[in-house]
Each structure stands twice: as structure tokens, then as C-alpha cells.
Image (tube, helix red, strand yellow):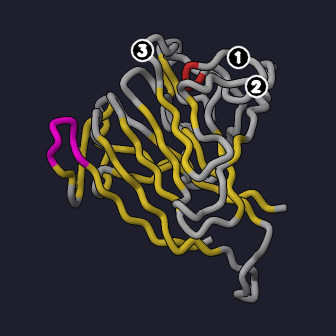
Amino acid sequence: MSFCMSVVSQSSDGAPLVGTTTAVDGGIAVSGFDDITAVPLPTYYDPPVSEAFLGNGGFYTGVPGNPALYTVDEGSIATVTISNIQVLDAQGNPATDWQLVTGDAESTDPGESLTWSTGATGPVLNLIPNVPASGLQPSDVGNACGSTLGPSYNTKYLTGIGTTTVACVAPSNQQGEKSGTVMLEALSPSSLTVTLVGSGRQAMFLGLLLS
């Protein structure tokens, strides 16, 4: 897969975040560009207060590389646009029947949200239900986006499933530790725009589903 990426970000006080950005996270300096850095899974682990569901507890652990894009500054708003997405075979020919996979790679807590869009004429974003390997009950998104663990989700806080724009917003009573996460798929999109709104930090992931 190949693509181009651009980022527009602003800090919690509304000032643009441009160029190299650095913050201290748990005593460790984290650097990115325009507020975004590529990181491995899991992006965040601080039980029992809060943790990223993806990459923890037996759910998609051991994923190689850096599939997540993580904001550096706490309380920032970052809009990541991924364009000219292409999947080519070994001979350089365009592949067919592939799905772009994306979703929440962090923990969307009160005051935070994530919005994904494939554009006005892009393919729709469908939900990939969570099937945890840790013995938890399979569910759509667990308790993320104000939902409850079970085969359903809260349509007030997780909107747009089956359309070109999906949003997950955390209600004020959102639990810290997550029992699921939003995972989405779209058939061969040429672009994807993700807006990450954090009261702390936020992250999204990117991958491929081949049929």
C-alpha cells in the first residue's frame, strides 16, 4: 500500500502546530511532525484507569511495525488526510477487492472524539465487530462511544455507520478502561480523512484487509 499524507493540527489554545512537535509522556520525550507520530500497538497502557483496547489483553497483540498515528500534544486537534491510496501486486498492477481498515487505536474519553471520512463520493465505512481473544463476549465496540458490552452500539455517540462519515464521541460518563474499540472497513477508498480530538492524546490506525 502506498499513499500521501498531510496533517493540520492545533494545540488546546488554538495555536497551529507546525513542524517538529515534542512533548514529555511519562518522563519520555515523544516527537512527531505537525503533532503526529507513527507508533506501534498498543499506543497506551495504564490500567485500571484507562488503556487502549487495541493491542492489549489479547486483542490484536503482536502486530508488527507502526500502524498507529498518534498525537503528540495533549488536548490538540489534528486532521490527518491520507490521499492517493493505492494497493499494487508484485508486478505493480492495481489490486482489487481490498478493504482499507481503520479505527480507534487509543482510548476515546470524555471531551474526546474521532471522525473518519472517505469523502462525499467515497465508499461507505462499515463496522468490524470486535472478537476479543481474551474470553470477553464478542461485541460491536464494547463500551466505547458510550456503548455497553454486547452485540450493539450506542447510536447517539457512534454515528454514520454505513455512510462515508463515521464519528465516535465519548459521553461525559464514559468509562476509562475500554472493553472494545471502533474498527471500520471501506472498499478500496482513494482517500481517508481522520479528525482526532483529544483532551489527552488520540490515535488512529491504518491497515489492509485482503479477500
Name the amino acid type tagged 3.
Ser
Earlier-in-chain disc, 1 versus 3: 1
Instruction: Name the quarter where the N terminus is drawn.
Output: bottom right
Residue tagged 2: 139
Residue 152 percent across, percent down from the top left: 73, 24
In front here: 40 or 112? 112
- Check residue 48 in the rendering and tell me which mark sits there, or answer none: none
Q: Residue at x 62, y 65 (%)?
A: 189
Above or below, 105 relative to 83: above
Residue 28 percent across, percent down from the top left: 31, 37
Q: Nearer the viewer, mark 3 or mark 2?
A: 3
How packed mark 1 is, by other alpha carbons closer than 10 Å (few <14, some 14-19, many 20 or more), is: some
Circle 2/circle 1 CB separation < 8 Å: yes
How packed mark 2 is, by other alpha carbons closer than 10 Å (few <14, some 14-19, many 20 or more), is: many
Name the amino acid type tagged 2.
Ser
Distance in Å between CA atoms under marks 1 and 3: 18 Å
Residue 22 percent across, percent down from the top left: 24, 47
Give the side of residue 94 with respect to residue 71, left or right. Answer: right
How packed mark 3 is, by other alpha carbons closer than 10 Å (few <14, some 14-19, many 20 or more), is: few
Residue tagged 3: 172
Residue tagged 1: 149
The secondary structure that dominates the magenta segment is loop
